[in-house]
Image: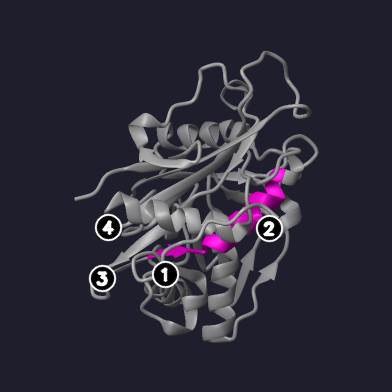
């Protein structure tokens, strides 16, 4: 049971009633930014948890600044609206919330200034974005990752995702599960929509934020687990393409992708071709944490059903 719903023009409505104009600036020019927030259902507890809701809206506020935009309310109010929306769906399964902030003016002309911001959130069921049950085969993309001097990769900007779409479709049409971006300098960057981690000689390594990666919230969560649970500090640095081939373990991660392990890159087995030991340990903790089964990670979560009734404030 349940129904996909949206917070649209100040009201919670069925998602089919939330429509924007074909003339909307954000639709025609990609002038906007978005977030993706998973909500996990815990059957045993009878509770649904929003994952990193505050962090997502804080990042959205930062991304909006790049685009001469701002959130319509405080982060706390945005989280309260998300709780209200998730409750209204009636779903008792994992769902996904997509907040979007965009230029809503119905005009012709490329710019960011002097335009009005519009905001909505929709909520709908979501399973796996990529297959997390088996090892993925990545293929290095012929497309380079967008550069900060052209389109900021650190932000979830609507129009920028054509870069990701080109990478993903090329990979799948070439027989791979997912693409692997290099940045303009030729260093490993990320998947089409996932952050990248590898293990070499017991060291957990990920590209740095200056390597044109999304400043991933799940990426930060993985680092927290590695440090808290296993005493492993993640090294952020540039990674050469061929270094990936000799890695002991590789996994990719993101709110949508969750944590998926990689068995091959460019037809080369990674390590033994099986899930690595550190990947398996981090993965086990992550999947328990997001469903509210580990009290020490409850700071990541916002309960939906057992929380007090949301109070939506006004912008300060």
Q: Of marks 3 and 2, which one's residue comes earlier in the chain?
A: 3
Q: Identify the element where label 2 is drawn.
A: loop
CB-based contact (under 8 Å), mark 1 and mark 2 = no
Left or right: residue 84 versus residue 65 is left
Q: Whole-Å distance between the Cαs marked 3 and 2?
A: 43 Å
* Residue drawn at the location 64% of the way across and 56% of the way down: 74
- The residue that mark 1 highlights is 308
- The residue that mark 3 highlights is 46
* Residue drawn at the location 26% of the way across and 70% of the way down: 46
Residue 288, how many percent across, how many down? 37, 74
**Image depth: mark 4 or mark 1 in front:** 1
- Looking at the image, which is closer to me, 274 or 184? 184
**Image depth: mark 2 or mark 4 in front:** 4
- Looking at the image, which is closer to me, 84 or 170? 84
- The residue that mark 4 highlights is 93
Q: Quadrant of residue 284?
A: bottom left
**Image depth: mark 1 or mark 2 in front:** 1
**Image depth: mark 3 or mark 4 in front:** 3
Above or below: residue 103 compared with residue 218: above
Above or below: residue 178 compared with residue 297: above
């Amino acid at each position: 049971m349940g129904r996909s719903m949206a917070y649209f023009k100040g009201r919670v409505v069925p998602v089919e009633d939330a429509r924007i104009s074909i003339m909307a600036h954000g639709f025609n020019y990609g002038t906007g930014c978005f977030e993706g927030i998973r909500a996990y259902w815990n059957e045993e507890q009878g509770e649904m948890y929003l994952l990193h809701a505050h962090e997502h809206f804080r990042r959205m506020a930062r991304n909006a600044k790049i685009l001469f935009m701002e959130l319509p309310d405080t982060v706390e109010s945005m989280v309260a609206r998300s709780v209200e929306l998730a409750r209204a769906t009636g779903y008792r399964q994992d769902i996904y919330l997509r907040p979007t902030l965009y230029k809503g003016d119905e005009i012709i002309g490329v710019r960011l200034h002097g335009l009005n911001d519009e905001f909505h959130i929709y909520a709908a069921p979501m399973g796996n974005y990529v297959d997390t049950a088996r090892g993925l085969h990545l293929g290095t993309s012929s497309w380079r990752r967008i550069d900060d001097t052209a389109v900021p990769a650190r932000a979830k900007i609507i129009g920028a995702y054509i870069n990701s779409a080109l990478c993903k479709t090329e990979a799948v049409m070439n027989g791979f599960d997912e693409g692997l971006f290099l940045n303009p300098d030729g260093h490993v960057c990320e998947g089409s929509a996932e952050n990248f981690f590898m293990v070499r000689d017991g060291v957990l390594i990920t590209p740095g934020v200056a390597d044109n990666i999304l400043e991933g919230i799940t990426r930060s969560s993985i680092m927290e687990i590695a440090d808290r649970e296993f005493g492993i500090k993640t090294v952020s640095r540039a990674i050469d393409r061929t270094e990936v081939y000799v890695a002991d373990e590789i996994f990719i991660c993101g709110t949508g992708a969750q944590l998926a392990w990689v068995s091959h890159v460019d037809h080369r087995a990674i390590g033994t071709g099986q899930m690595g030991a550190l990947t398996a340990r981090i993965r086990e903790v992550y999947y328990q944490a997001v469903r509210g089964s580990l009290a020490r990670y409850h700071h990541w979560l916002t309960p939906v059903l057992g929380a007090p009734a949301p109070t939506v404030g006004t912008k300060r």
